Image (cartoon, helix red, strand yellow):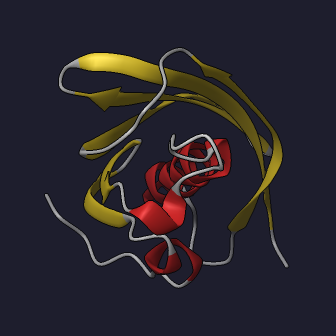
Amino acid sequence: MTTEFPQVFSERVGLTITEVEPGYSRGTLTVTDDLKNPHGMLHGAVLYTMADTGMGAALSPELGEDEVCATIELKINYLQPVHDGDVTCETILESRGKSIAYLESDLRQDDESVARATGSFSIFTP
């Protein structure tokens, strides 16, 4: 199921959320020269953005009409450098309580994991 998901900041780096279901999201990004660090590799902040956005997208369908979510903490491990091509981020909601959710993201290129992230999100009524 593909769901419309607002993409303001993520569009600036070229991230497209292609699939959103309750507890799951998938996003893709094509590496461009503008997204590379001085060493010619994809900047780590881009992968971080993919994970953070993917986590919010996976959690959003789980929220009540009066609830919102915000990142409390996100940890990412960079496993392989990315120089070009496409990167995919798949996120799964692992646990959801009344006020805290825990999610995991796997960022892949050509079926190889290039980064893994875990995150905790606050769930609250504004």
- Residue visible at 53% across and 14% down? 79
With 97 as the anchor, is 124 left or right in this view? right
x and y percentages locating residue 99 in the rendered image: 80, 46
117 vs 40: above or below: above
Q: Quadrant of the C terminus?
A: bottom right
- Residue visible at 25% across and 46% down? 86
Q: Quadrant of the N terminus?
A: bottom left
- Residue visible at 39% across and 38% down? 83
9 vs 72: above or below: below
Task: Work out whether residue 108 or residue 97 is closer to the camera in this orientation and state it.
Answer: 108
x and y percentages locating residue 117 in the rendered image: 61, 27
With 108 as the anchor, is 8 left or right in this view? right
Query: On the image, which quarter does residue 111 sit in?
Result: top left
In this view, the residue farthest toward the left is 1
With 14 as the anchor, is 80 left or right in this view? right
x and y percentages locating residue 59 in the rendered image: 53, 51
Q: How many marks?
A: 0
- Residue visible at 35% across and 54% down? 31
With 73 as the anchor, is 54 left or right in this view? left
Q: Is residue 107 visible?
A: yes
x and y percentages locating residue 12 in the rendered image: 51, 80
Task: Work out whether residue 57 or residue 83 is closer to the camera in this orientation and state it.
Answer: 83
80 vs 84: above or below: above
Query: On the image, which quarter does residue 109 sit in?
Result: top left
Q: Is residue 97 visible?
A: no
